[in-house]
Image (cartoon, helix red, strand yellow):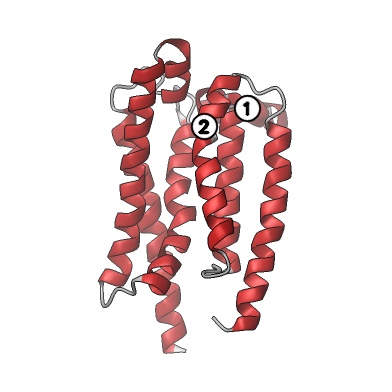
Amino acid sequence: MDRGSHGASARFGLILLALFALATAALGIAPRYRQDWLLENIVVLVAVPLLVIGWRRLAFSRGAYLALFVFLLLHEVGAHYTYSQVPYDEAFARLTGHSLNGLLGLHRNHFDRAVHFLYGVLVTPMAVELFAHRAPPRGIWRWILPVCFVMSHSVVYELVEWLAALRFGGELGTAYLGTQGDPWDAQQDMALAALGSVLSMTVLALRAGRVQTD
């Protein structure tokens, strides 16, 4: 990336950062469960400053920044309501007069499932660029390592959720874990993140192949 495009991507990232800060402040007003909101935002308080500190050395593409921005906004929505209580079904019913869960045959709140899947979809582009800049893999590893990177983060997050639930217990632990009585919740969340990453990587690989042939 040349100096001009590097600067443009950095400026675009700073604009998204400002918008995200405003959205976070708005969604931080009267969240449904303040302690859970604080726990959910620990990851944000670590990840966002690292991106800001490192932007001079590594500015990602606009597409990667935008994808991460969308994911973090969804995370803030989940933090505001708690993931297991995001009223997406009620909002859909107000707009259409029908229950989305009913139409899809779902029997629980699936906002958390959707966000885990979108984590794989939306964070993978940044993982690809990170490897390309810092540890360029060769051959097929160019496509495998970013997926493994995203999957490893998904595993770490599930472990953090488990440890937090053990540490706090009670209503807070239940709200943060958000299993909704599903004993396989962690495994399904990790599988969806992996699937999202594989799909994202497939699209990126097809685009790269089309560019090369052109």
| Secondary structure of the residue carrying numbered label 2 | helix
Of the numbered discs in the image, which one, if any, rests on residue 40?
2
Residue at the extreme front of the image, as rendered: 53
Pinpoint residue 125: horizontal percent, then vertical percent: 46, 62
Residue at the image point whose x is 54% and y is 67% from the top: 60
To which quarter of the image does residue 187 belong? Answer: top left
Pinpoint residue 39: horizontal percent, then vertical percent: 51, 28
| Secondary structure of the residue carrying numbered label 1 | loop
Residue at the image point whose x is 60% and y is 21% from the top: 34
Residue at the extreme bottom of the image, as rendered: 214
Foreground pick, 175 / 56: 56
**Three-letter amino acid code at disc 2?**
Glu
Pinpoint residue 192: horizontal percent, then vertical percent: 37, 43
Answer few, some or many: residues within 10 Å of disc 2's Cα (few below 14, many 20 plus, some between 14 and 19).
many
Q: Which residue is mark 1?
A: 98
**Three-letter amino acid code at disc 1?**
His
